[in-house]
Structure formats: C-alpha cells, structure tokens
Amino acid sequence: MAVQKKNKEIPQRKKDLLFGYVRNCEKKIKQKNVPMAITYLCLRFWNIAGDEFDKTSANSNISFEDDINGIKLPEGDGSGKNVNAYLLNIVSSGIHIWKFKQNNFNDFDEIGIVNVEKNGSSLKLEGEFCDDGDYALKLSGKAITSHKGEGRLESDYDIYYKDGFEDDDTIEMTLNMTNLSLHWRVNYDAGRKIAIKKGEYRAVVSLYHNGGECIVTLLSYRHIV
C-alpha cells in the first residue's frame, strides 16, 4: 500500500504505458503472474530514473524531437506570445536536477516550474509565468532574471553576461524540496538561487514565438532522494 500511495504523484500516462507493457509481456510468456507490488516498484524506479516532455501538455505550435528528448518551435510569426511545453514528472520531495540545451535564444524565453496544486489540470499553454506559486528563469538579452508569482524580483537578481547568450548554451535547473530552493546555472557559472514554497511542481519550458527556429533538448535528469 505504501508503494502504491507514493505512485499517486506519477502522471497517468506513465502508469498506462508501464501497465500496458507488463500486460504485453504476460501475454507473450502466456502467464499472468507478475505481482502488482513488483509493477508498482518498476513504475517508481522509472519515474525516478528519467523525465521527458509531455506530448499532451504543450502548445500546438510546438513539435517534439523524440530522438533527442526535445521540443522545437518553428520560426516565429510575430505574434509576440510565449508558448509552453511541460515535462511529465510531478515532484514534491527530494532533489531534482534538469539540464537543458537551447540552440537559439529569444528575449522572453523562460525555464522554470509551475505549482500543480494551484494550476490543476488547466495548464497554461500560452503566456509567461507570473502566477502565484510559479517560478521561472527569464532569458532576456544579456541578462537572466528569476521571478516568481508575486511579481518579478528586483534587478539585483539579474545575472549579466558580457556577450549575452550564445547558441547551444546549457541551463541547469535544480529543484531542492528539502531546503525549498530553486537554483539555475548557465553553462558553468555560479548561478542564481531563490527560495520557493512547499508544493507539487512540474518543470516547464516557455518559448517566445517571435524569432528564429528554436530547439530545446533535455540533456539529462537526476532525482536525488
């Protein structure tokens, strides 16, 4: 029961995929003897081991690059809007580290987390993240600015880069639910850390639909219990 309770936070899509895989294996060996506890343990391990973009929770302008675990936004249409893509995992404990690579940066791109409890099933597929309980790293010209739902943080939270962002820069985001902090690093810089509130979160990438083609790759994901 304890194992099943912990798996309530895992997205239904992952559950369906794994349960279907187990049933298919049982058919092939013509036996139905895989204990449910083992199935749930496998599900828990899979959820810890990786994360990926959720194809059911992304703006229609975004396509998926399955071979690189990434997303692609075509050349912008001048609408001046952000379009969003969420990752699958819902996290509420432990330490979670995502590393992204972006091949082209626009002034209002964002990478961050959204509060699942406050957003519910109505995930925002268009627009920036400024709601209470959401936290994002804004990539703007030569600076990155971290902000949260109560309004953008003061300018001393900006990190300025002499030459601005370059193609294929990497962004590492660490969500620490033990000390309630969110930490970003661009390439190998010291980064920026802000305090967050306790809750359940999903990672999200928000791209500004007003520039050239942009591809964001999830290079790696780690969960430290």
Image: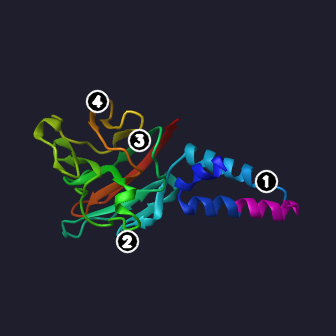
Label 3, label 4: how far apart the Cα atoms are: 14 Å
Percent position of residue 30, x then y: 88, 63
| Left or right of 193, for residue 33 | right
Percent position of residue 56, x then y: 46, 67
Where disc 1 sits, the SS reads: loop
| Tag 1 and tag 2, C-beta contact below 8 Å | no
Magenta run includes residue 120: no
Q: Which residue is disc 4 drawn over?
A: 189
| Tag 4 and tag 1, C-beta contact below 8 Å | no
- Mark 3 or mark 4: which comes first in sequence? 3
Magenta run includes residue 31: yes
Residue 35: numbered disc: 1
Three-letter amino acid code at the position of disc 4 = Asp
Residue 99: numbered disc: 3
Relative vertical location of residue 192 with respect to residue 86 in this rendering, above or below? above
Three-letter amino acid code at the position of disc 2 = Ser
Residue drawn where x is 64% and y is 52% of the image: 4
| Tag 3 and tag 4, C-beta contact below 8 Å | no
Residue drawn where x is 13% and y is 35% of the image: 156
- Mark 4 or mark 1: which comes first in sequence? 1
Label 3, label 1: how far apart the Cα atoms are: 35 Å
